Amino acid sequence: MIELKTRAHTESVSLTRILNRTLRAGLAKRKPDRQRTRRFKQKTMSMGRPTVDLDKALALAAQLEDEEIARKLALRK
């Protein structure tokens, strides 16, 4: 980056212009016949139907939290 800033200063050109030129030159040198890497594809699996109604997720979270609080209180006794 320092080299690019120095070059921009010596050529009296903005850093953006130098950076764009450098990127274009690098991309132009790429070999078009170069084998491309395989695109990542996520494998999915069916997990079946949900056992809980997720439309009421906040109510479920509150119920689970209440159960956990009750469990912790029971452990204190």
Image (tube, rainbow, N blue to C red):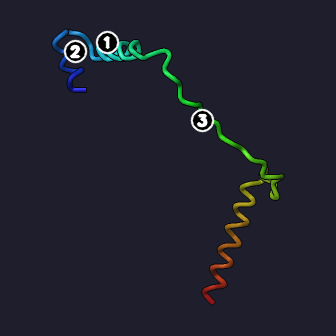
Most distant residue in the left direction: 10
Q: Is residue 35 left or right of residue 68?
A: left
Determine crowd level at label 1: few under 14, some 14-19, many 20+ residues with C-alpha closer than 10 A: few
Helix, strand or loop status at disc 2: helix
Q: Kindly indicate whether the residue at mark 1 contacts the one at mark 3 (C-beta within 8 angstroms).
A: no
Q: How far apart, in angstroms, are the residues tagged by discs 1 and 2? A: 8 Å
Residue 52 drawn at (x, y percent) = 80, 58
**First reached walking from the N terminus: tag 3 or tag 1:** 1
Mark 1 = which residue? 17
Most distant residue in the bottom direction: 77
Q: How far apart, in angstroms, are the residues tagged by discs 3 and 1? A: 33 Å
Q: Kindly indicate whether the residue at mark 2 contacts the one at mark 1 (C-beta within 8 angstroms).
A: yes
Q: Is residue 7 left or right of residue 56?
A: left
Amino acid at circle 3:
Phe
Residue 70 drawn at (x, y percent) = 68, 77
Task: Work out whether residue 4 or residue 68 is closer to the camera in this orientation and state it.
Answer: 4
Foreground mark, 3 or 2, reads: 3
- Residue drawn where x is 65% and y is 74% of the image: 69
Mark 3 = which residue? 40
Q: How far apart, in angstroms, are the residues tagged by discs 3 and 2? A: 38 Å
Assign the C terminus to one quadrant of the image. Answer: bottom right
* Residue 43 sits above or below residue 25 on the image: below
Mark 2 = which residue? 8
Amino acid at circle 2:
Ala
Instruction: Find residue 38 and report its image quarter.
Output: top right
Amino acid at circle 1:
Arg
The circle drawn on residue 77 is none
Residue 66 drawn at (x, y percent) = 69, 70
